[in-house]
Amino acid sequence: MTCAEQEDIAILAQKIVSDHMLFVCAQNAYDLWNSKTGVSNSHLFQAQKHALEIRKKVLLMVENKKTIDALDFCGSILSFDGSDDKQSSIKQSLSSLVFLDLLQSGKYTEAVKFAKLSNCINRKLLTLIGYKNTDDPIFREIAVSINRGDIVREINKHLFKKETGRESSLLSLAINHYNSIVSYQNNKNAFELYYSIKLTKY
């Protein structure tokens, strides 16, 4: 391998690591990594850093149960007019989570008011109106269907795609592609072994 090829591989590796930090919103690590690789003053880096900060802000709102703020903020940066299926899905997920958070925090009146104003809440969740005991097995069974972590990942992937055109980091895509190749090869080997054994019987 020539020196030029080694340098190209090193640059590619740096970009892949930086891209993954960007995707997972590892802001401090992203800043430190790019300051050491000498690209922290570029316009592209500044734009990506700003986008990362916006994504992280939204994700922290959802994680910290500030879901009304998250819904309002997402409404300001996304199109919630029904013209985009993915964004409509995010609106429904967030609206359902707002309703659930209000119920679980004992704000029953606010939850009912929000439900009347919103047409995006998961219909099954509406059956929880009237439950004041959030430890009730039926309440918990229905509430668990709204997964906060899944919603965080859904929002992150969508906002990242708006920035890069991809729903995953380059590292994740490479790993998934590698696993697909390994899976295909294993299935192919198993298929060939099966027929080689079958043929020996004749």
Image (tube, rainbow, N blue to C red):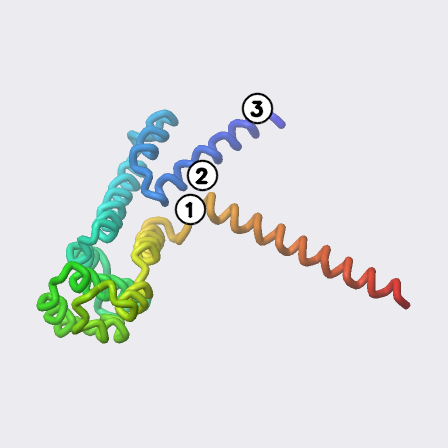
What percent of the width, then of the height, locates residue 35? 33, 27
What percent of the width, then of the height, locates residue 66? 18, 53
Q: Quadrant of residue 102?
A: bottom left
What type is the residue that disc 2 sits on?
Ile
Q: Of tags 3 and 2, which is closer to the observer?
A: 2
Q: Which residue is mark 3?
A: 3
Q: Which residue is mark 1?
A: 169
Q: Is residue 170 above or below residue 162?
A: above
Image quarter in which the N terminus is found: top right
In screen coordinates, is 162 left or right of 120? right
**Mark before the other along the chain sequence, 3 or 2:** 3
In screen coordinates, is 5 left or right of 103? right
Image quarter in which the C terminus is found: bottom right
In screen coordinates, is 38 left or right of 9? left
Q: Assess disc 2: are there few (<14), some (14-19) or many (≥20) residues with their C-alpha within 10 Å of its C-alpha.
A: some
Nearest the viewer among 90 and 34 is 90
